[in-house]
């Protein structure tokens, strides 16, 4: 382990540019050494624009560099598995974007490879790093609204033009479920503290996406304790606000504007005493995730979301997709 932690970026992506380069540099002792792109021109531009000293089109240039301790994989979804396996066998710690993989078999291989290599595998499910969700979880665990009865998640927005590439036209790696609904799933697992047992879903397509790729969804899930959960997700709804509502036997917890990448969200509790706002001290979600990952790499903590969290979220997302395709309720099996 080098000090500072040396990073290689695998993927000259939008999310790296917008959030992760800054989040790595916000850590007291981390530096970005190299960026991989399949395009020499894109890699060069990414390196220049982000002040990264090197770029490469050959993953081995990163994986054989002894100064690189960790890699951030943010390529298109179908590359996450092969690049994680290569990085693990080179002894690099891995922060991988979600979905961790496209199949359960691949995700299991990734977890096993990282375990065998003794490296950290984290999956960047950022919403659990939102301070409002963390506060909401504390209140639920403290029993502030009594027995949980039902939950509603609102995660509909209009996909910005800049993101309308593979998300809306790749039937393998694209689509709302593995891009966005999987975040809702991870957030629900984090907040409720368990996995759903059954899911049902209906999807829309064709408003923005094509080739059968879904761009809208309604999901119903049953969690242990007979808790019913509903999700509405969409790429095609402008002017909507993301939120969550938790309905308990003694009260309701309402999170508003809390399903984005920003350090945002307001939390309200409503019960027999009326409605009050619960103060939330926000922090940058990605800084939080990178701090947790860095501690895990140093052996002093755990990632915010592990490879196992990524696998569970993927398994649930695939069950939702199966339900949407077959029109049937699907029992969820977490491998
Ligand atoms: P991008 O489309 O920006 O990047 C994905 C890949 O597309 C890049 O690795 C790049 O390949 C290639 N690419 C980028 N720009 C171009 C271009 N102009 N022409 C052709 N190819 C291009 O994707 P995102 O940043 O939106 O997503 C990357 C990953 O991160 C996905 O797995 C996604 O699910 C995840 N994500 C996670 C978020 C989170 O908050 N956790 C938020 C957004 C995305 P190359 O590297 O070869 O240059």
Image (spheres, rainbow, N blue to C red):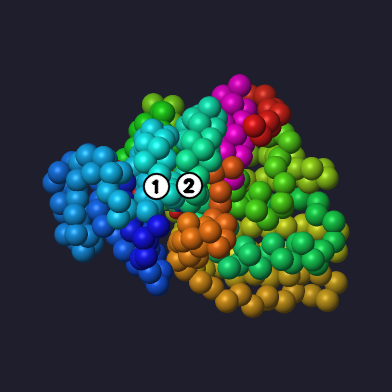
* Circle 1 residues within 10 Å: few <14, some 14–19, many ≥20: many
In the foreground, 277 or 11: 11
The reply to whether the magenta stretch includes residue 233 is no
Mark 2 and mark 1 lie on one chain; the one further toward the N terminus is 1
Report the residue marked by disc 2: 119
Quadrant containing ligand 1: top left
Does residue 6 appear in this view?
yes
Give the residue drawn at x 38%, y 33%: 82
Give the residue drawn at x 15%, y 51%: 44
Asked if residue 175 is positioned above or below residue 192 in the image, the reply reads above
In this picture, residue 240 sits left or right of residue 35: right
Callouts 2 and 1 close, C-beta under 8 Å? yes
Q: Secondary structure at mark 2?
A: loop
Magenta span of residues: 309-326
Give the residue drawn at x 56%, y 48%: 306
Report the residue marked by disc 1: 92
């Amino acid at each position: 382990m080098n000090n500072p932690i040396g990073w290689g970026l695998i993927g000259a992506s939008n999310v790296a540019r917008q959030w992760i380069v800054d989040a790595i540099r916000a850590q007291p002792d981390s530096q970005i050494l190299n960026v991989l792109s399949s395009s020499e021109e894109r890699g060069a531009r990414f390196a220049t624009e982000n002040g990264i000293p090197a770029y490469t089109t050959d993953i081995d240039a990163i994986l054989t560099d002894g100064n690189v301790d960790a890699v951030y994989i943010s390529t298109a979804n179908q590359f996450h598995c092969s690049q994680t396996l290569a990085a693990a066998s080179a002894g690099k710690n891995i922060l991988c974007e979600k979905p961790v993989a496209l199949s359960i078999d691949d995700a299991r291989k990734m977890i096993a490879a990282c375990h065998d290599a003794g490296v950290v595998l984290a999956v960047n499910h950022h919403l659990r790093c939102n301070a409002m969700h963390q506060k909401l979880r504390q209140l639920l665990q403290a029993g502030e609204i009594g027995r949980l009865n039902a939950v509603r998640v609102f995660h509909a927005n209009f996909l910005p033009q800049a993101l309308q590439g593979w998300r809306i036209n790749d039937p393998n790696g694209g689509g709302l479920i593995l891009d966005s609904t999987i975040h809702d799933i991870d957030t629900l697992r984090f907040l409720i503290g368990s996995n759903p047992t059954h899911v049902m879903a209906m999807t829309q397509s064709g408003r923005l996406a094509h080739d059968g790729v879904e761009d809208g969804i309604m999901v119903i899930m049953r969690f242990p304790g007979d808790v019913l959960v509903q999700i509405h997700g969409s790429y095609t709804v402008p002017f909507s606000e993301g939120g969550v509502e938790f309905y308990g036997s003694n009260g309701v917890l309402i999170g508003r504007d809390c399903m984005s990448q920003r350090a945002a969200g307001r939390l309200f509790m409503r019960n027999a005493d009326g409605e009050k706002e619960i103060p939330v001290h926000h922090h940058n979600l990605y800084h939080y995730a990178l701090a947790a990952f860095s501690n895990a790499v140093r052996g002093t903590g755990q990632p915010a979301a592990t490879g196992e969290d990524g696998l569970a979220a993927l398994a649930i997302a695939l069950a939702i997709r199966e339900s949407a395709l077959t029109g049937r309720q699907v029992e969820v099996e977490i491998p």
